[in-house]
Amino acid sequence: MELAISIIVGFMILGAIYAIHAKDILSAVITGGIVGYSLVICFLLLKAPDLAIVQIVVETITLILMVAVVLDSSRTEAYSKLDTQGWVTAGTAVLILLILFWFMKTASAPLDHFGQGSLRMADAYINGAVEKTGSTNLVTGVVFDFRGYDTLGEATVLVTAVLGVLTILRIKGKK
Amino acid sequence: MKGMTIIVKKTTQLIAGIIFLYGIYIIIHGHLTPGGGFAGGVILAGSFILLILANGSDFLNLVREESGSTLYENLSILVFLLLALTGLLAGAHVFFANWLPHGTPGTLVSAGFLPLYNIFVGIEVAASILTIFLALIIFKEEVLR
């Protein structure tokens, strides 16, 4: 299974690289969909059907929205060659990326191998969640009962995003 | 935005209802099978988006739909918050307390508040995504007209 996930992740990286270098923005947006749909297969292989359902539907809708946005604006990218300031910016970005990667590697060294073992909190969720919440789908039990505050936050973020979109996109005032 | 050919229109009219029913199924079985409010809500929004893309926005009067979806979105998040607030009044007196009887796990009406939360989050997500899609379509046409 690790081999399959490695192949899919390599495919995702190829898609992302092509999306960066594509001349046409519409093809870049559609190639970006490779990343999302490959992630769906990864979620299914890692036995997370809840996430896979959400990811495949959200990816489709996002693709439609992005295509709608691209068709309304220009399809060619404003491309310029790197000058001195551009090289300095790129170098700083790579340096910060390396530092962050080193910190992440140091921080994740004492953790268990991915997919093996579980944290103390997760044990409390897994054992006896059905008796505590009455829900046979453990994910819904965690999302709406144990972590209800998080879900309220997510829903509020969505409402705020819609309010922002309506405020920015409304060209003509409402009477 | 113009509509598509009559073949696409008829096909979408046939399958949009089935997609809508599938979204409702995902939402109300959220506490039993994989899925839930977020996934089902996006599927519901997808059925509407399919109809709008196929039939074209000039065929439908979408301004009324936009105000309706904004209203539903805000009302459902308000109801979600009020349901969570009832936990302060009854049961263990904590926010998000699941004080309704849990019933037998595995049946459709069980798990106390979780199906209600799923339903209202589903309505909220569906209305939000539909509102964003409608905003991208109609606000430009308002200016062009």
Image (cartoon, coloured by chain):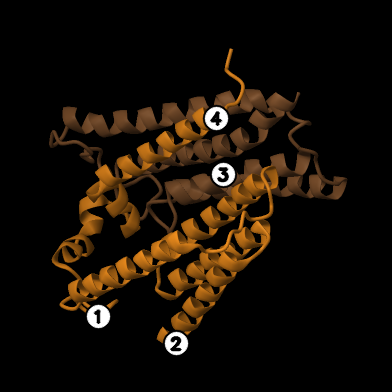
**Does the rendering let one see residue B106?**
yes
Q: Which residue is mark 2?
A: A3
User: What is chain A's hue in the picture?
Assistant: orange
Residue B4, given in percent of the width and then of the height, sits at 82, 45
**Which circle, 4 or 2, is nearer the viewer?**
2
The reply to whether the C-beta atoms of the residues labelled 1 and 3 are less than 8 Å apart is: no
- Mark 3 residue type: Leu
The disc labelled 4 sits on which kind of residue? Answer: Ser
Q: Which residue is mark 3?
A: B44
Q: Chain of mark 3?
A: B
Q: Which residue is mark 4?
A: B69
In three-dimensional space, the C-alpha distance between marks 4 and 1, rounded to whole angstroms, equals 45 Å
Q: Is residue B17 visible?
A: no
Tag 1 secondary structure: loop
Residue at the far top: name it: A175
Instruction: Give the spatial CA distance, label 3 vs label 4.
Output: 12 Å
Q: Tell me which numbered mark, 1 or 2, is placed earlier along the sequence.
A: 2
Considering only order in the chain, which callout, 4 or 3, is on the residue closer to the N terminus?
3
Q: How many other residues sit within 10 Å of disc 1, few (<14), some (14-19) or many (≥20)? A: few
Q: Are marks 2 and 3 on the same chain?
A: no
